[in-house]
Image (cartoon, rainbow, N blue to C red):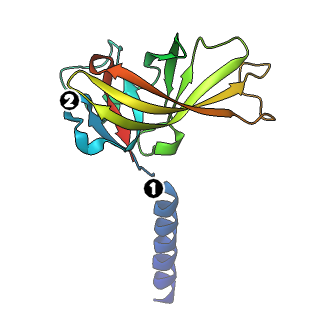
Amino acid sequence: MKRNRTVIMIICLVQISFYSFAQGGWDIDYITIDSLSITEIGRDVKIDFKNTSSSIDKGKPNFMYFISKQDTGSLELDGEIIEFVEQRNIHLDWGFYDEQFLESVNYSDNKIIRIYHTIIEEITSDSVLFRVYLETYSRGNKGGIKDDLQARRRCEKVWINRTKLDGVMVK
């Protein structure tokens, strides 16, 4: 009898431990571009450019369809067209809002721009005005970011046509 209780206790402890480590986390919601309304003005969002992948069933889009990796889009900054690629750290059972960002592709040979924060400023029938917070980093030797330098931060406002967006991620 005592042995049965011990076995049951061990099984319970193993299950509790397993489930406490196996649970994922998720703090991302999604608003499609057609559902975006003026109630979202002032909200911190992550821009989601139009999905260009042909391997996804576009007839039945789901959340993962909209946030696929490596979609690209361009923004006009300081009179220049800068291309950005979505950097998504999303998995089947976890994904965190603060880990999603846009990164420049063609800004400079030795600089990278990242956009971690974006605020919706205005919404019209055909475009959305975003206030984007740009963080400029120096590139390291292997193309990554140099850890020893602080990012230069600045803010710009950019209009993006709705046809170039799938939607926005929100926390």
Neighbour tally class for label 2: few under 14, some 14-19, many 20 plus, Cα within 10 Å: few
Q: Is residue 95 left or right of residue 111?
A: left
Q: Nearer the viewer, residue 85 or 117?
A: 117
Q: Is residue 165 left or right of residue 154?
A: left
Q: Which mark is residue 64?
A: none
Q: Residues within 10 Å of mark 1 (few under 14, many from 20)?
A: few
Look at the numbered disc 2 and give the secondary structure of its residue: helix
Residue 30: image quadrant is top left
Kind of residue sitting beneath label 1: Gln
SS of the residue at dot 1? Answer: loop
Precedes in sequence: disc 1 or disc 2? 1
Residue at the disc numbered 2: 34
Residue 111 location, x and y as percent?
69, 19
Q: At x 25% / y 45%, what residue is drawn?
A: 39
Q: In the image, residue 60 lies at what x, y percent? A: 19, 26
* Residue closest to the far bottom: 2
List x then y, in percent, for residue 44: 41, 43
Q: Residue at x 48, y 32 (%)?
A: 132
* Residue 97 versus residue 166 in the image, above or below: below
Mark identifier at residue 23:
1
Q: How many marks?
A: 2
Q: Residue at x 74, y 36 (%)?
A: 150
Q: Quadrant of residue 128?
A: top left
Quadrant position of residue 73: top left
What is the three-letter code of the residue carrying label 2? Asp
Discs 1, 2 touching: Cβ within 8 Å: no
Q: Position of residue 79 (x, y in %)?
A: 52, 11
Above or below, comparing residue 171 to residue 80 in the picture: below
Residue at 50% of width from left, 89% of height from top? 2
Q: Quadrant of the N terminus?
A: bottom left
Mark 1 against mark 2, which lies toward the viewer? 2
Q: CA distance from mark 1 to mark 2?
A: 32 Å
